[in-house]
Amino acid sequence: MDQLTSPARPTIRREQEMKFGTQITASGVRFRLWAPQCQTVGLKIIGAGTLPMQATERGWFELEVPGAGAGTRYLFVIDGELEVPDPASRFQPEDVDGPSEVVDPLAYEWRDRGWRGRPWEETVFYQLHIGTFTEQGTFLSTIDKLDYLVDLGITAIQLLPLGDFKGRWNWGYDGAMLFAPDSSYGRPEDLKALVDAAHARGLMIFLDVIYNHFGPKGNYLPAYAPVMTEKHKTPWGAALNYDDEGSPTVRDLVFANVRFWLNEYRFDGLRLDAVHAIEDSGPKHLLQELAEQTRAATDGRYIHLVQENSKNQARWFRRQADGTTRLYDAQWNDDVHHCLHVAATGESFWYYENYAGRTELLGRSLAEGYAYQGEVTPHEGEPKGEPSGFLPSTAFVAFIQNHDQIGNRPFGERIGQLVPAAVTRVLAAIYLLSPQIPMVFMGEEWDSKRPFLFFTDVGEDLAEAIRKGRREEMRHMIGDSEPDRLPPDPMAEETFRACKLDWSEPDEAQTGSHLALYRSLLALRNQEIVPRLRGLQGHAGRYEILGDKAVRVSWTLGDGSSLVLSANLGSEPVGGLDLDAHPHLWVEGRAGGDTLQPWSAVFDLHAAPGQGTSAG
């Protein structure tokens, strides 16, 4: 019987209590709002009128309403004029500008009692966007694909941001509500059911969160609270206020949100978006305090924290003396992506200029993490990165595709549309079999031809500015022979719908064999490499350049055994490799003790994927 429905499996109810938002009491609901920049706050109960809220110390307003409960919809009225939703709303059934709905977090009966998560080194990510992963685009329809992901060899799902955004479709990075999953994907209990179902299958589930900006629509906080500051600037304008007057409560809001997703929704970890844009000149950086509080508040589960950080700051990922994580587990390794992408495609525009013709950077990024470790980059003309060789390879998340690297192309092409199939296979083998934590982008495993375009539905008043900005940003990627070719309209519904995965593709012969290769690679990783990653130390990687676009990388793994990967991404054979075919990959593990047996695998990437593969 399914673990989720077995009557023998006890249930549990969970709530993350916090000073923000609503709390259901014995007699009704307590409402609270931090609004230090206004004189009065009213509570408008939809269908029942407006009640004055009581002002308390430090800019707080609160009111307990007898008889209110789950399903009650409400707005706050600022100084008798501006009606705003609750910034800590758990659900926005009528989008970001509509009333908030009281949700009883104790109503959902969890069935994952005893779930402790999984150790970090077992992580194999699968990044997906709820709205385009299935035709229905909902939390519940995603559950139907979980068994498929387990069979593929995935151990962790990473969801693009869910915070409620303006409109019907969005990548998620225009979120206005930190605590409310977007209503277009389903209700809060549907998201909890997805997390619950993932845990029942041994899958971790991560959420992408955004603490560097709010979207352009639906964020009313600046009208009554000092959540933004002109002290710092970001690509989105004024920065979130983490170090100016009023910042302690803003920081508390973020920390409460972290605990909310990890405790009330039982996520196993968070991916923090673009932390290089989080400005904080205070005595303790927000990122440090966030990680420290999270580590101190865990309930015995494995909790993992991942950064996106273009500054390549290795300091955040230092391990403790026993090898365990102190602050953050890992960073998305854009350098591995860029090195592999440039070697495969030959592209040298934009930031790819930094990696063109630099095979040594490919070897370095695989062996040590960062390709740039303080050197000046040609494109930016500034130093980038910090020395990273002291970190274990598991402090980096490697990938050949993700939402950014596909979606930030004018036409959303995937790597399989840019290079021959044999090249995509060797790229996959390299990153799936390295000791770095791999991340597969949805549909990549069967070489999906569906694009992942930039799409948003924030409103017609911003539509033309978005279209123009998109055209200007993408101009350098559109060939000189077709300068008038325009990217798809990011505001159009057909652009969004074009990105939905076609689940009939894996059944076709070519994509099916590509899928077989991914399954065999992940099976090899999970069986031979993952068990040897525990205890992996820094300074464990070495690389040598064998020729143009050809490298050999070796690592000493946590149990003393070694992993050797030889790869040729060039168009000609390279002497000294174990195979003459090109492109190709050879990987082998060498025993570090009497109890371990050496193993090796040859991937004939000119054969149909999944064929011509041997291990012994």
Image (cartoon, grey):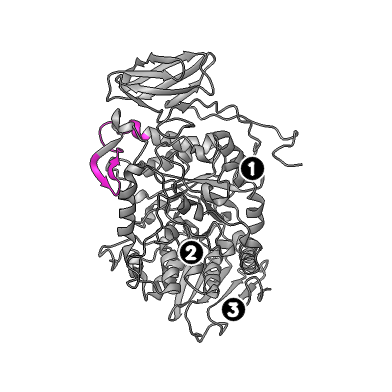
Viewport quadrant of the N terminus: top right
Q: Which residue is mark 1?
A: 197
Q: Amino acid at mark 1?
A: Ala
Q: Amino acid at mark 2?
A: Arg
Name of the residue lying farthest toward the bottom: 575
Mark 1 nearby-residue class (10 Å; few <14, some 14–19, many ≥20):
many
Q: Amino acid at mark 3?
A: His
Viewport quadrant of the C terminus: bottom right
**What residue is rendered at 33% in x and 32% in y?**
221
| Magenta run includes residue 248 | yes
Name the mark on residue 606: 3
**Front one among 455 and 128:** 455
Residue 357 x %, y % = 37, 76
Residue 197 x %, y % = 64, 42
Say above or below: 404 vs 58. Answer: below
| Magenta run includes residue 364 | no
Q: Which residue is mark 2?
A: 414
Q: Is residue 27 left or right of residue 211?
A: right
Lower sequence index among marks 3 and 1: 1
Which quadrant holds residue 251? top left
Residue 286 x %, y % = 35, 41
Q: Which residues are magenta?
A: 230-251
Q: Is residue 95 left or right of residue 422?
A: left
Gap between marks 3 and 2 measured at Cα: 20 Å
